[in-house]
Image (cartoon, rainbow, N blue to C red):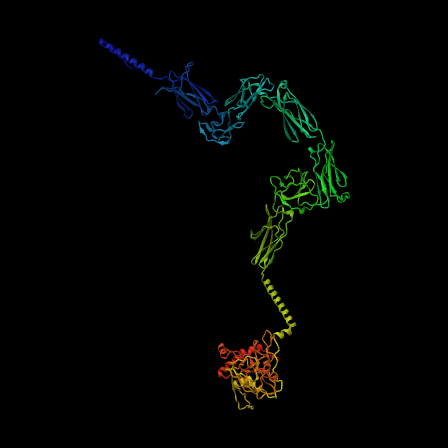
Amino acid sequence: MLRSSVSPNSKPNCSPVWLICFLLGLLAVHTHAKDVLTVPQQVTLSPNYYAQQLSISWLGGAATTFDLMILRTELNETVFYETVPVTVNEVSGRHQWNWTSVEPLECTSLSIKIRSRQGQTTSQWSNVEILQGRDLPSIERFQMYPQDRVVPVGANTTFCCIVKEGRHLGTISYRSTVMNMTRLSRRSYAITAINQEPSGHSGTNVICYDDLKTDITGAVVFVGYPPLPTDFVCETRDLTSAVCHWKKGRDTHLIGGKRKTYYSLNKGPQQEIEYSVAQWEDKWTLVAVNPLGQYSITDSADIEHRVRPVAPENLTSVTHAWNATVMWQWKHENYFSLDLLCQVELTSQEHQTMLNFSGKGLWSVVVSDLYPDEDHSVRVRCGAQQNFWRWGDWSEPFSFKTNIDVPDAPDVWKYIKRDNTGKIIWKPLTHRQSHGQITGYEVTLWSPEENIQHTKTVPPNISYLQVNLTQNTTFTNDNKVIATVIAKNAAGVSQSASVVIPLHWTDVDLLGVSRVVYMDGGFPLSWQSNANATCGYVVEWQDALCIGDCPVEWIKLGPGNTNVSIESANFQPGVRYNIFLYSCSSELLQRWQGYMQELVPSSSVPLLSPIQRNSNILLSWGEIPLVNRRGYLLGYNIYISNGSQLTLLANLSDPGSRTYTVKGLPEGSYKFTVKAYTSAGEDRGATASITMEPYTDWLILEILASLGITSLFLVIVTLICYKKRKWVKTAFYPDIPEPKLSGDWSRKQGPLDVKPSPHSMVRIVDKPDWDSKEVLVVIPEEDEEEDDEGQGMGDEPIDTDEPTSLRYYNQVVDDRPIRPRFPDSSASSASSLDSARTDVTYTGIQTSGSSLVFQLDPQGSSEGHQPQADLSVSSGGGGGGYRPQMQPRAPSNDLDLASTQSFIEPQAASAGGYKPQCSWHLDSPVEAEESGNLAPCLGSPTSVASTQFLLPDGGSEEHEEEKRQLSSSAATWLSNLLSSTKP
């Protein structure tokens, strides 16, 4: 503080200075006083616990900005600290500001203080004001806040639990979910549920437990929507008053007490969903309110456009067989002057029909097209015909029953067997066809040719009549019988229905059958129009496997129909149905077969035991019964079992196949499975096993059979040969005559003229010890030719190239017969000499065709030509002499048989003697050319009974040894083969 002092010794001129200084000091003090802000005074707190809102008011002078600080008193934690603008209330002169707390205000005590602020200048803080919470030590009980709070869907809500004094908190759960907690004070804890979903009508529970689970407390929160009514409309029922109604719209999830929605119409009293006003107004406003908000909606219209009549009352009827008149009354007299449109709902046998009628003040209608003896029910509603708004309310249902009438004609058909027995059948009349209770049927059999009738009565519960047309002699000569059926009830009899029964059976098997496929709930059939079906067609179907009295179904069609889809509730899967098309005169026109649904066969193939055939196995099976097929058989699958696997061997697509051969299997055990299949799949299959046996026995049997057949053939050939043994012997083994000494050998034999071959040589062997001194005389060829010319050979050709011939004479002839001998080649000459007493050796003797002429056998056998006569040449007298044995030659036309006979002497031909075997041929073509192609001849004379040369060759000893070897090997074997002697 400034201080001033005045000295008595001061001069008077100093006083203005002091005055100025004093004034300046006063100005400074005043300025400082203006810069200091007013501290807020008289702070008051006004809590709204339900809204969790705290209203703070104070006296703050002229300031307009304040700093507010809110702290949790116990923990001194700042909850809110902000600078807020607050204006002064002109009336009260106080400042007021509202703060909304996240936590309920009951959770803990709050401390509030305020200070004024002007820019950067602030006043002192006001005195702290405390809002006491419910966690004070004096309040010891277990508590939870808020209670019964109503919040909108999607809001976040904080709950706090104040634990009992001296205890500790356990858990807090929201909808059975344990939540994370935040500590607010020593005893208070808080949780926050975010984005809350709509609660049930009883709300959502929040539960708090202490740590010992002994104490529990909780709260309920209601989460819902504000109201949203719809379809608000006002209308008139009596052409005077108004009735307004609406729909609540979406569910608010808030019901009961203060939480439900309240409605008000044109600011009238609160209502629920309907409101009536005695007088019509042109505009209506509806307001809906609940704790979460309100919603308003308006409607306006003229009364003529909002007429909705009330329900007709007191319905009555007047009934007939086929129609009825329905009448009613109106509650309001104004309706009789109103053009009405009425709707009658008719219900008959659970079938509903809607009928429309119109008229001024309408109060009765005639309902037609009803069925006799049938219960009906009607109800009526009406609306304004002009400016139609809505249908009025339905009347109460009214029931009545129509009168009875005569029945409809029955639907008649026949089921006749081959023996003309069967039954007349008809479909039982339904309730709508009988027109009353059926009392019976009358069936009449009528012969149009004989004009004779037989009538029988059938009870009402039977819909067939057994007939035997063969036992009725009246119809034996007729071609057809007509059966008529009529139905009877209390109102009378029906019209007659008839069916023609042919007495001559038509064999259905002669008519081709077609397959039909079930589709769209039936069998689709089509056929060509038939000129005989002038009155229509009948389609009949039945179970194809049924035997005896089979249930038959049929439908009748008009004459213009050529297709139909037959449907029946009795069709079963896996059952074959026969379908027949008849004309109305019972003439069979067409036939089908089909399955509603094909199934796999119900039984397996009857598989027979396999049969082994060498390395093949024959599988055979029987036919599946028709009743077990349950579909069209498409073929068979043959499997071989490999353990648990089945391997497909073959697919037989022919359903008629009954066998299959598995070829080329080695030895072992096999298991085969045969499965029949339809379009639905395979059956379970039949299995057969077989073990392959070695099939060498069959090979042995085949060999033995072949040997037996061969042996039988040989036996047959042997028997034939035995029967024909003489012919076989003559053909293959002719008798060769034995050499004989016949004739007179005492007569001197004539000379044997032989033309010598250029290569023929005669060697005279002289042996002093022989007794005979006779020698073989050689006659030169020239002398031979002279003799031949003198004798004249006729026209026989003469080979001029032949060399000089020799003449040989047998001087001594032994009378002993020549016997067959088989000496070695070394002893052949000696043997011959012993027999003929001759010491002669021929080497290379060849006779000329001109010197020796042979009689040929024109009828020689196939084995060779045998000469007719042997040319014998002897040396004179009668006895045996030399007889050359000539091999057959090919027949020649140049030989003269007559000259041959003149040349050969009779005695020489008949006499026995020595015969040289002329079977030798030249060894080489060179030798043949040198010999001038002379006739071949054996190289040495031999005896008739001998197979060896008599005369040795004139060659060297080596050549002679070689000839002997050839004789013993080839010549001997060949001679033995071609020559045969008889013992």
Residue 344, percent from left and from top: 64, 26
- Residue 501 location, x and y as percent? 72, 42
Judging depth in this view, the residue of 911 and 528 nearest the camera is 911
Q: Is residue 673 left or right of residue 110?
A: right
Q: Quadrant of residue 715?
A: bottom right
**Can the viewer see residue 9 in this picture?**
no
- Could you tell me which residue is drawn at 63 percent across and 73 percent down? 728
If the image is split into quadrants, where does the C terminus sit?
A: bottom right
**Image position, residue 935 (x, y; %):** 53, 79
Residue nearest the observer in this picture, 492 or 195: 492
Residue projecting furthest to the top = 12
Residue 226, above or below 736? above
Q: Is residue 749 above or below residue 496?
A: below
**Residue located at (62% from left, 75% from top):** 730
Expressed as whole percent of the image width and height from the top left, the position of residue 970 reads: 53, 77
Classify 257 as above or below 715.
above
- Asked whether, in this view, residue 479 is left or right of residue 785, the answer is right
In the figure, is residue 548 to the left or right of 385? Answer: right
Across the whole image, how many numbered discs are drawn on residues? 0
Q: Quadrant of residue 59?
A: top left
Q: Is residue 514 above or below residue 51?
A: below
Asked whether residue 500 is in view, the answer is: yes
Question: Foreground residue, 708 or 884?
Answer: 884
Foreground: 229 or 458? 458
Q: Quadrant of the N terminus?
A: top left
> Which picture quadrant has residue 31?
top left
